[in-house]
Amino acid sequence: MEGGTRQNSVPLHGSIDKSRILDVKPLKSLIPFFSMSSQAPPPGQYPTGFSPFFPFGAPRQTPTEVTPNAASIPTPIRVYSSPPGAGDSSSTMEGFSDQRTSGKKKRRSPKSSSAKSSLAKPKKTQEPPVDLGVLVGITPAQKEDGSREVVNFVLMAFDALRRRLCQLEGAKKLSLGPIKRADLKACNTLMTKGIRTNMRKRIGSAPGVEIGDIFFFRAEMCVVGLHAHFMGGIDALHIRGEFEEETLAVSIVSSGEYDDDAEDIDVITYTGQGGNFFKKDKHAIDQKLKRGNLAMDRSSRQLNEIRVIRGIRDDVNPNLKVYVYDGLYKIQDSWIGKAKGGGDVFKYKLVRMPGQPSAYSVWKSVQKWKSGTSRIGLILADISNGAENIPVSLVNEVDNVKAPTYFNYFHSLRHPKSFSLMQPSNGCTCTKSCVPGDSNCSCIRRNEGDFPYIGNGVLVSRMQLVHECGPTCQCFPNCKNRVSQTGLKHPMEVFKTKDRGWGLRSLDPIRSGTFICEYAGEVVDRAKVSQLVREGNEYVFDTTRIYGQFKWNYEPRLLEEVNPNESSEHYAMPYPLTISAKNFGNVARFMNHSCSPNVFWQPVVYEENNQSYVHVAFFALRHIPPMTELTYDYGVARSDHAEGIRAVKGRKKCLCRSSKCRGSYG
DNA sequence: GGGAACTCAGATTG
DNA sequence: CCAATCTGAGTTCC
């Protein structure tokens, strides 16, 4: 980086009215706040990775001093026990709540020791005597008709199980033999255990699935009843009529594999099924008016609503296919066309019903911006000024405020001198890259014997602490166990919200479990925390606050590979670490609070400069559609909690609009 | 060495 | 009961 020796490395806009900057507090500020630092800090030396962000005026103020205080160095993490009261569970689904008694304890034994439990199991084709669907909280009524809560629950269970299967498969720990398709296996397991919803087929929307929701597997849409087929593009409903059976199309998946024309945003030309023209050697034959095609034909007369799911292949990563639920359409026209191979195909023109929230159109807009079309409201192309390897744009589409109060963009943590958290550990001796399942890898052993990430860098499970490889590891820097150290994965946007200051969102869809960013800033002496708060520093991340509990990991009872009595999830992680992002910080300082967030934090430890430091890493809690605001739970201060949330002053009214909103936070 | 083409197993529904 | 459907990840090819 340039090091910030120049007065200002961010282009200035001469016309900006400085009085407007007074407070665009991005984060926690919902009360009036007058910034004392509308002027930038002095020119000076910045460590590598710094990129001063001075939208207005020359640097002046000295960065806050970080005072080392050896006496208050926190206890080593292994010794730290959880404080009382960490369990104000607000978990919703019965059975998945409160398993923290065993979850708190660190499991010492690697999972391989418990893998043998499945050997004595009967053949997997047999129905288990216990209905896990009931055990984990899906009632028969919920199986038939979904709700947002149930849909989220089922999707969470699906992906957690899929990730775990990928992890076990990668480590060759499965006694079932290789699983080539973890998605299908996870789907099959959930289906047989009754963890699914919207089984009752219906015309129109599937309760709990919202327009704009994204899916990374066809199987995900099966388990929530959005579209019943893994492969089939047309899902149909059969209605027993008085005289004959009527069949109507209820949903289609437009995957672009046929030459479906997806140019017009609200119109789809969909090709019927059959005709063999995927297979190269076989020449195309005419499609028949049966099955899905028959249903589409009936629907084109009946004019019933049809759910449309658009499959989108990612430009950047062609292996990644994302499905977007784009709402209800009706067939406007149908005809017989010619396929490239020569056969007749059925063609259907579907038109989106008006008045629905935008979904696919958002993707189209993002695509345009990425290909260079000017973005309305764009203030700055990259507020990190090169500190991140992916640009972070600054956008305001709602008012005239030009920038947040100034801060120094820094991508990671600054520690006070001699602020040692853990003894440096000897790195692993793996060559090239650490391999899942390698019991000789000391880093894997530290992660309870599991490789914490699956191939594409997705976190498998929440843990008390994720141990990543560091400089003393002999593996290559591109080792898969360095996910949180490699910076942003998606282009981000700091944007002005209507009523919550600045916020953060991604231009790309984000898969559940994907690393988003760490909470960067200055590590603060615990003794100074209350002082910071008194001073009005609202950019404080404190790991010891009380955070709402939630279930994210796989459900052990669904897997034959693990001991069913074992809890898979470690809840509260009261490792004492306080970070101030007021003067130095990254995109994380712009993430707002929500009582039903889409992002969670996870402590990650790795070594730098011969010390092991704990970092706060943020991961996607669910799949997040593009342009959706990223939020996490700010938690409740311990002192506030003791006195009862309502009574404490200084808390802010929550504007997250979630149905589970606690009303205030801070 | 990187993208395109090919391979292949695979579950639900009707 | 099994055909129809085309995915998703891995492998090979050029």
Image (spheres, coloured by chain):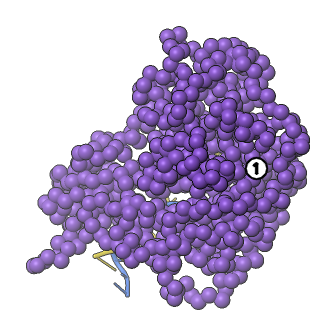
Chain colours: A purple, B yellow, C blue
> Which residue position holds label 1?
A576
Chain letter of the residue carrying label 1: A
Q: Residues within 10 Å of mark 1 (few under 14, many from 20)?
A: some
- The answer to whether A51 appears left or right of B10 in the picture is right
- The answer to whether A426 appears left or right of A443 in the picture is right
Q: Amino acid at mark 1?
A: Pro
- The answer to whether A413 appears left or right of A625 in the picture is right
Kindly indicate the quadrant of the structure image that contains residue A162.
bottom right
In the picture shown, does residue A558 fall above or below A88?
A: below
In the picture shown, does residue A632 fall above or below A279?
A: above
Q: Can residue A221 be seen? A: no
Name the foreground residue: A254 vs A450: A450
- Image point 38% across, 60% down: which residue? A208
Instruction: Give percent across and percent down for residue A220.
Output: 45, 63
Name the foreground residue: A432 vs A310: A310
* Residue at far top of view: A14
* Residue at far left of view: A243
Name the foreground residue: A306 vs A395: A395
Instruction: Give percent across and percent down for residue A242.
Output: 11, 78
Instruction: Give percent across and percent down for residue A496.
Output: 48, 31
- Image point 74% across, 60% down: which residue? A82
In the picture shown, does residue A368 fall above or below A405?
A: below
- Image point 38% across, 58% down: which residue? A209
Instruction: Give percent across and percent down for residue A651.
Output: 57, 42
Q: Quadrant of the N terminus of chain A?
A: top right
